[in-house]
Amino acid sequence: MRIEFYTTPRKRSPVTDFIDKQPKQDQAVILAVLQDIADEGYGAKGCQFKQLEGKLWEIKIKAPSGGYRLIYVTLTGDLMLVLHSFKKKTQKTPKKELNIARKRLKEIL
């Protein structure tokens, strides 16, 4: 599976920026999980997948300092485009975070 991160029209990647700002141990876990997904697909270990709505799905990742969520969409078969990422603080996915992903999805479709 190929994994890419959403890029703004100005060629900035908010997902990469977010990951880069996390503690080094958490970065390592997140990147290892993404590599495992790239290698193993949806059978990857260390994460869970959950459909949020329509084409939007989330990857749940546990890291040393807490949980992380990456919201993505699958495009053209084996391309996973990660639209948004955030640190988990509540049981449900906050509307604010979901709205960011929805907006980015509209931009790319």
Image: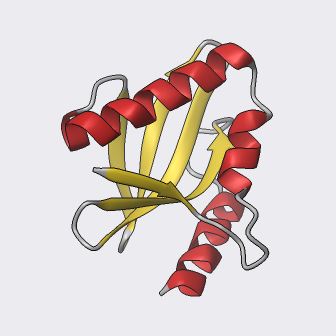
Q: Image point 65% across, 63% down: which residue?
A: 95
Q: Image point 74% across, 35% down: which residue?
A: 20
Percent x, y for residue 50? 35, 49
Colouring scheme applied when the structure was drawn: secondary structure
Where, by quadrant of the figure, is residue 9 drawn? bottom right
| Left or right relative to 109: residue 37 | left
Front residue of this view, candidates 105 and 76: 76
Percent x, y for residue 85? 62, 49
64 over 70 or under it: above or below: above
| Left or right relative to 65: residue 58 | left
Q: Image point 55% across, 42% down: which residue?
A: 69
Percent x, y for residue 73? 41, 65
| Left or right relative to 27: residue 41 | left
Count of numbered circles on the image:
0
Front residue of this view, candidates 99 and 35: 35
Where, by quadrant of the figure, is residue 40 drawn? top left
